[in-house]
Amino acid sequence: MRKIFAISGSTKSISTNGLYIAAISQFLDKDFEVTLFPSIANIPHFNPDLDLEDPPKAVHDLRLNIQQADGIIISTPEYAMGLPGSLKNLLDWTVSSASFSGKPILALVASTQGEKANQSMIDILTVLEAKISAQLIPFAKAKINKEAEITDLETLTKLKSTVNAFVATVENG
Ligand SMILES: Cc1cc2nc3c(=O)[nH]c(=O)nc-3n(C[C@H](O)[C@H](O)[C@H](O)COP(=O)(O)O)c2cc1C
């Protein structure tokens, strides 16, 4: 069984990025188990004074989930021309622990436009030494329905190809 840990950059209960994570989960073979991180909103504000061996519990649990995963999915909207603060905050907590170093990551930006968030995500994950398969999905809400079916053929084809690249990295390193 391959463990995939999924993080949505959206704190909304019903979210376009949540639907894309659900769609990707359906693309994956049965030996891939996707666990969605439930609590991005519960991660405390990053503070170097607390970034110690024994960090806040929510951060400890986050790092453990990442460490135990064979691959990570991050799917996020763009807010105000960048990554949502909640996601940037989460990523800041993974710098000193090097949690993403060498990890296969499927990095999606599903947003209205999203170019800046997409570039920012690639820059950050590169610094964190992740193995990145990235895709930007502009006008993302209009391309997926409430059943998590991607209705835009071009997006569907491209996303399957990005997911295949991610799967190959998980399986082969
Ligand atoms: C505060 C705020 C700022 C936003 N800024 C941007 C932006 O700069 N660029 C963009 O493409 N979309 C922007 N959006 C739109 C969201 O990214 C878009 O609605 C996205 O699909 C929401 O995803 P979600 O349903 O997963 O939360 C913004 C939305 C909000 C609430």
Image: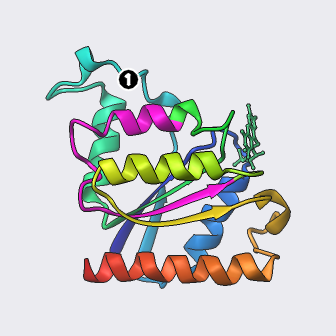
Q: Is residue 145 visible?
A: no
Q: Is mark 1 within 8 Å of ligand 1?
A: no
Q: Residue at x 70, y 79 (%)?
A: 156
The x, y position of residue 5, in whole percent, is 42, 58
**Of residues 47 and 134, the one drawn nearer to the viewer in this rendering:** 134
Residue beneath the point at 42% across and 23% down: 44
Q: Residue furthest left?
A: 53
Quarter of the displayed picture in which ligand 1 can be seen:
top right
Label 1 Cα crowd, 10 Å radius (few <14 / some 14-19 / many 20+): some
User: Picture coordinates of residue 49 (x, y %)?
Assistant: 24, 14
**Of residues 112 and 145, which is closer to you in this image?**
112
Asked if 146 appears above or below 89 in the picture, the reply is: below
Mark 1 falls on what kind of element? Answer: loop
Asked if residue 152 is positioned above or below residue 136 in the image, the reply reads: below
- Residue 35 within the segment the image draws in magenta: no
Which kind of residue does numbered mark 1 sit on? Answer: Phe
Residue at 50% from the left image edge and 45% from the top image edge: 120
Residue 55 sits in which quadrant? top left
Q: Visible in this render: residue 154?
A: yes
The magenta-colored residue range is 87-110
The residue beneath circle 1 is 46
Pick whichever, 1 or 45, lies toward us: 45
Quarter containing the N terminus: bottom left
